[in-house]
Amino acid sequence: MAPQIPIHQSLSRRRVLSALIAAAGGTVLAACGQQSAPAPGQPAGGAQPTTTGAEAKPTGVSGGAPVAPTATIPAGAKVVTFWIPWGQPERQKWVEDWGAKFRDKYPDQALKMEFVGFANMRQRWIAAQQAGQMPEVLSTTFPELGSAFIAGATERADDVVKDLGGNTFFLDAPLSAWQYQGAYFGLPLYVFPRMFYYRKDLYEAKGLKPPTDWDSWYQSAKALTQAPDRWGSSLAPSDHSPEVIDYLMRGQGSSMFDKDGKVQLGTPEGEAAVDMFARLVKDTGPQGMANYTEDDQVKLFISKEVGSVITWPALLQWVAQQAPQHVPHLGAILPPGKSARPKPVTTNIGFALGKGSKNLDGARKYLSFIMQDEPNLAFLHSIAGVFPVTRSLAASPRFPEHPILKQYPEVVKTSLEASNDGIEGGYLNGFNATNQLALTTTPGLPEMMQAIVLENAPVKQAVDEQVKRMNAAIAQARR
Amino acid sequence: MATRAVARPTRVTGGLRLGALVDRHFMWIGLAPAALCLLLVLVYPVLANTAYAFTNKSFLFQDTSFVGLKNYFDVLSDEVYGFWAALRVSLIWTFGTVAMQFLLGMGAALLLNQEVAGQRFFRVLLLVPWAFPVIVYAMIWRWMLNDQGGVITWLAVALGLMPEPVFLLGQPTTALPAVMGVAVWYGYPFMAASLLAGMQSINSEYYEVARIEGASTWQQFWHVTLAFLRPVIVVVLVLRTIWVFNAFELIYLLTRGGPNGATLTLPVLAYNLGWQQFLPGKAATVSVLMLLVLALAAIAYFRALAAQREVEHG
């Protein structure tokens, strides 16, 4: 018996190994089989007709990102993969609904939506670019898409812009931002201005008028402040400090960067802007304001007696839903300038075409389709607080007919005017490869403001240090 | 026939040889897939990261080139990168948090090791912090610490501990202790559970002998409990030190490294350099330096453990 044991063992091991190899081989074959007949949940897949069943459903996972439910992808359809930044169900439903209508118009095309989110878009496009797996269409912020274009991750969008009608179709300011070295690196979808929102009732109760310059701005905010029950302003040096500082610089006829991308923060206008910002934070807001996020400052404005805030128009919806008693009292103006009317600071969201994606023809058709009035208006109405970039919708009486926007006719009118005229914060002189890097140094503009507000760092010293960091970031990029 | 007679044994011999080879190296063959996976998911990223640290790679510009030690010189010598300040914050954050987690975990484990009513309930309760995703509890803590109606701030003012509402996460002097407090709340149950498991493996006879010898409660704790727990303590301290040193989400969600850099640790700095500044070369440099710091910590811990064993075994 003894000699049989090793024979038995060796046979058993070999069998185990053979079984494992066979299983691994089978798995590889199965995987290869799937590749030749891609499931709808797979990335891109684009122009190659699928051979799966007509009603195959997405798997729910694609490229490691959560996939919002998309319409079924029929056999033989060319797929337009669309990375969306919006987590809101209303906007995802818009993508789905108009994706179905797009398919009705172009039966050989199908839209596949993937939710990526604003916060994760950068990681996704960088990874996808390295892997050669860019989607046909992606949507996110203007600086992000500009960076993706410089990095070679996206295509020129000139032909789509031209097909749509260029300047006759889009508003001048929202479209002009999307150019870099003569090329359109994307096209706008919507825009929203940062406005100075104020409580008319609080101002009137104190016999104050909306501010018209820096002096009246500071004095009125100070007059309204009765800590800890009432605050003159809710203005935080948060992630959006660059926009506020740029606003304050524009209000003196300057801006954060000149036309060559040179940092202007160290100029007298820059220092005055930082000083004004710091005084408003320190003297007219609550103690913790220096480390509030934008969300915190908006919540404060909604939930307490606060005179003013500079923020985005999503505020309109939040006030209507969470503090409807304030709706009749909400006013909006451009933040006052010191010596000049500031050019409005806007945030721009748009589309870009993924470089190397397989169905660019379908992507162009989709963008041309989705920018038409009906789908575009449906998007703008999916969540109130974003404004049109096309001439027809900006002039259309249908746009302000949204149930929430209707409650604020004056605010909407002012915001529309600002949208039509505004330029992204930090990019008054056009898109520049290094502006974004200079705006996001570590430590950055928010930390500079915190050093001034919390640790009483002298403005000039804090600004000089920040300018040094910004110039280092630019030099690093131009190495 | 002759040819076949020769050829046949040759094939059999070859098959046997292969079989014998498989038998001899079966363990390595069996381990190979797992080792390959480890190489791919662990070793490759570390090597790639180390390689990036010697380049000027940018996510924005394509022209990557070898720059030698320039990234190290830049990060270590140029204050615009804030490495030394971040290292200081990282060390305070790590050692302060781990020490507090350990002390609290030890206290909880000692309490739960007693025969008391509701012992099981309290043991389950210990795991509650682990039931929440970091995003949820970070937001809840942020609200509780808010100066405009946060319950902790309100309580502190009501009890006279604060003269006026202060946003603890918003002050350079209090932000780091506040973030550490949240990390202690989240991390001490791991310490407690690990130490409790260690305590329950100590034979009760040792305590009986100690009592017979006249040992006080403190002496029993010091000479029996701690002596037997030492290997567990070293392991949990090493693990927690590594985890806490590398922690990113909690700090980022609570303060994003602010205010004014008060909570800017090395992982947050690496993230900012890599994903905000598009400088993976610099971010990789910071992470390699982090690896060196952690390696030093791990070596120190394991030397302490080895020295202890030598003492124990004469």
Image: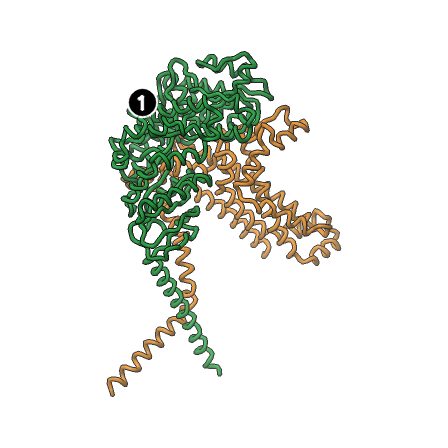
Chain colours: A green, B orange
Residue at the spot of label 1 = A258
**Residue B103: quadrant of the picture:** top right
**Percent from the top left, x then y, of residue A54?**
37, 55
The relative height of residue B93 versus residue B204 in the rendered view (above or below) is above
Residue B45 or residue A80, whichever sits in front: A80
- The residue at 42%/43% (across/down) is A115
Instruction: Indicate the secondary structure of the residue bearing disc 1.
Output: loop
Residue B72 or residue A449, whichever sits in front: A449
Amino acid type at image mark 1: Asp
**Percent from the top left, x then y, of residue A78?**
31, 49
Residue B125 or residue B310, whichever sits in front: B125
The relative height of residue A220 versus residue B25 in the rendered view (above or below) is above
**Percent from the top left, x then y, of residue A416?**
40, 24
**Residue A159: quadrant of the picture:** top left
- The residue at 42%/24% (across/down) is A415
The relative height of residue B100 versus residue B228 in the rendered view (above or below) is above
**Percent from the top left, x then y, of residue A7?**
43, 78
